[in-house]
Amino acid sequence: MSTETILITGAGTGFGKGFAFELAKRGKRVIATTEVLSQVSALENEAEEKGLTIQIEKLDVTDPSDREKAWAWDIDILVNNAAIKEGGSLIDIPEANLTNQFDVNVFGPVLLTQGFSKQMIKRQKGRIVFVSSVSGMMVNPFSGPYSASKFATEAVANTLAQELQEFNIEVATINPGPYLTGFNDREMETWKSWQDDPSTRVFNYDEIAFPFEQYDPMDVIEPGIKVILGETDTYRNVIPEDMIEQVKEEQQKVWEMSSTKDLGQRHAMVQKAYDLNPRTKAEDY
């Protein structure tokens, strides 16, 4: 059994939960954290049913007292997985929702990482993994707030990789594509929480869906765990691998984009958001 302790934030659902349960199944020491207390008891019950030993704690990465509490845990690997996804056009989304997007996805993880990285520096050893996204390298309409936060995450991770290198601290990213965890589809429902005047909105969010076909989320767990455990030493890890070329092509398009071509016409991806049904599976499209 490994003596390393792995802290995973945002482990109440999705990839974080998948990583935590699979690592525990393999005998790893895992601290799985959730944003709210109600998720703690639900996760504890599920882990017990599966016969898994996991330390489950409440950790809201935006809460200074929670971060302070977490720094008392002796960990070797930090997996910054906690995230939210605020959907909607950048010209419609209210300030409070936009601010929350960056508080949870950028500022909270950076501040949490500060405390743990200084402990790792003292030991001259550690690993920090950011669960980013392909949305940190390419964009699509109505996910602008999330993409902006993940572009920031990419900058944070790359900067830390350079700054922490001399202290023997590894930094890596996991960049999942569109997976059917419910995360992407919930994004397209967040407009229902907006405290705004609906008559001022440019787009009709009742008619818009996430504009990508989605993959089976279990396909992320095994390659993601290899990154977490350091079995894969690639800094950036796009999953699935067959999206790597698509991401590179989208990045290249920005260099060749015209600011005037196709003005007055709806963008193809905006139209796809209107045409695609929610929760469309990649294999069915």
Image (cartoon, helix red, strand yellow):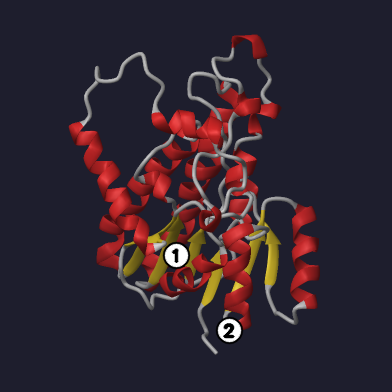
Judge left or right: residue 136 versus residue 208.
Answer: left
Of the 4 image quadrants, the one containing the N terminus is: bottom right
Q: Is residue 249 above or below residue 48?
A: above
**Residue 285 position within the rendered picture, expressed as x and y whole percent measured from the top left:** 51, 51
Amino acid on which the number 2 mark rests in the picture: Arg
**Residue 35 position within the rendered picture, expressed as x and y whole percent measured from the top left:** 67, 51
Residues at marks 2 and 1 touching, judged by CB atoms closer than 8 Å: no
Q: What's the distance in space between the residues labelled 2 and 1, CA to CA?
A: 26 Å
**Residue 7, label in figure:** none
Q: Is residue 114 above or below residue 209?
A: below
Amino acid on which the number 1 mark rests in the picture: Gln
Q: Secondary structure at mark 1?
A: helix
Q: Residue at x 28, y 54 (%)?
A: 245
Crowd around label 1: few <14 · some 14–19 · many ≥20 (10 Å) = some
Which residue is tagged 2?
26
Which residue is tagged 1?
119
The quarter of the picture where residue 256 lies is top left
**Residue 253 position within the rendered picture, expressed as x and y whole percent measured from the top left:** 24, 37
Q: Residue at x 44, y 39 (%)?
A: 147
Q: Is residue 103 above or below residue 23?
A: above
